[in-house]
Amino acid sequence: MQNFRYVGKNLFIEKLSIKNFLKKQKTPFYIYSENQIVTNFLKFKNTFKKTNPLICFAAKSNSNLNILRVLGKLGAGADVVSGGELLKALKAGIKAKKIVFSGVGKTEEELKIAINKNILLINCESESEAKLVNSLAKKLRKKVSIGFRLNPNIDAKTHKNISTGKAENKFGLSIKSFKIFLKKINSLKNINLDALSVHIGSQILNDAPFKKTLNVMSKLIKELRLNLKYVDLGGGFGINYTNKEKPINLNKYSKLVENFSKKLNCKIIFEPGRSIIGNTGLLISKVQFIKKGANKNFIILDAGMNDFMRPALYDAFHQIIPVSKNSAKTKGKIEFVGPICESTCKFGIYKNYQRINENDFIAITNVGAYGSSLSSNYNTRPLIAEILINKNKLRYIRKKQNLLKLISS
Ligand code: LLP
């Protein structure tokens, strides 16, 4: 996270002192570094430069319109999973021919939008979906490019809730079912099978499952003599949430992808989300109250699990750092918790943390991916502000939701 650092005792994001900014900005809020977004995207692009893939940013990881705009300007396409994300990507200026649509349960309404907008690929995940696309395309008098998402039955060795490529997961079609479907595809006159896609999971830190997937795809495409324009290799590239973890190193994998793309003569698509946006954001929160517990003190923040779900959903670790450092220590254990009426509304336990008082401010780190996009109005709490910073210029890319509007229904 090179764009977050301490200058003396104070936390800065790019050239902005959070402490100073807090004189006029109420907590909690998300703040992102634009330069870190650009750096991450260009680094990913550079890793695969010999393959020259289409990089479709996974909009589900952060669907803020301005963030999509920043990435769109850099040449990114979008991987979308709903009609809403599709329309947002277009609104952000991303061309339809750079948009791929994934998801196991696309509705007729969503598919019609995709067909009418002429997006690059609808990545179907079942035979029924492909048939529906065909019949809708026929009605709309179009020929539609589809991809088929395969389930390669590969263990991505990640948290079970974010693993998607094993046979037990609902995603994609097994190779066996795909082969059966392939025999019938010629009767579906309004679709073209232009791509295969895979996405085996998220927050994958080792390249072995990716290499395995590439082998499975390569064998299958050769065996079936498929003539594909694209192979969509999905996302899932992990980042380091702790100091001990290392982000995935994709250099070796990129060479394999380069060979794969040359041999099969097809364009590669990637769908990275977390690796582009994860380390770009902080969630700034205030210590509302401190309460003594039986064997630890509760540090009650004004940010809750509705603002940031990952710890509650996946027991995810996100380092919590002070906005202003001091050299004193708290005795014993403390637990950062939020105000929501759920026991899972908690953000981490620390020992020997620096002295912490009510009205102090902290930052929850690496919240750019699946932070704001997973947030909700649970407990009738408004969605919080999102701010994008470039050097010392800041932009409100989402205003805090209006409470009166929120209580209108
Ligand atoms: N493509 C498809 C089809 C996906 O389902 C996903 C993520 C991605 C790409 C992007 O994966 P990434 O590069 O971001 O790992 N909420 C969870 C993560 C869920 C991921 C869902 N699919 C979390 O906070 O860890």
Image (tube, helix red, strand yellow):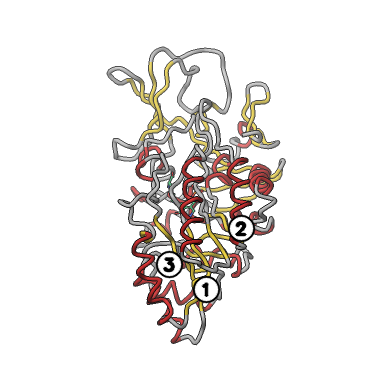
Circle 3: element type: strand
Q: What residue type is labelled 3?
A: Cys
Q: In which quarter of the image is residue 279?
A: top right
Judge the density around disc 3: few (<14), some (14-19), many (≥20) Cα neighbours within 10 Å. Answer: many
Q: Quadrant of residue 90?
A: bottom right
Disc 3 versus disc 2: distance between alpha carbons? 25 Å
Q: Name the residue under label 3.
A: 124
Disc 2: which residue: 263
Q: Name the residue under label 1.
A: 145
Q: Quadrant of the N terminus?
A: top right
Q: Is residue 67 above or below residue 224?
A: above
Residue at left offset 38%, top offset 76%: 184
Tell me: 285 left or right of 106.
right
SS for callout 1: strand
Quote the CA–CA distance across marks 3 and 1. 10 Å
Q: SS for tag 2?
A: helix
Q: Which amino acid does label 1 sit on?
A: Ser
- Disc 2 marks a residue whose amino acid type is Lys
- Tell me if residue 337 comes above or below residue 267 in the rendering: above
| First along the sequence among labels 3 and 1 | 3
Q: Where is residue 83 in the image (x, y as percent from the top left)?
A: 46, 68
Along the viewing direction, whichever of 164 and 402 lies nearer the viewer: 164
Q: Residue at x 59, y 53 (%)?
A: 397
Q: Mark 2 or 1 closer to N-term?
A: 1
> Could you say where residue 37 lies in the image, as x and y percent from the top left?
63, 46
The residue lying toward the viewer, choosing from 375 and 147, is 147
Q: Distance from label 2 to label 1 (Cα)?
A: 22 Å
Q: Residues within 10 Å of mark 1 (few under 14, many from 20)?
A: many
Residue 265 visible (yes or no): yes
Q: Answer whether labels 2 and 1 touch (C-beta < 8 Å).
A: no
The image shows residue 71, relative to residue 132, as above or below, that is above
Question: In x, y percent, where is residue 368?
Answer: 53, 44
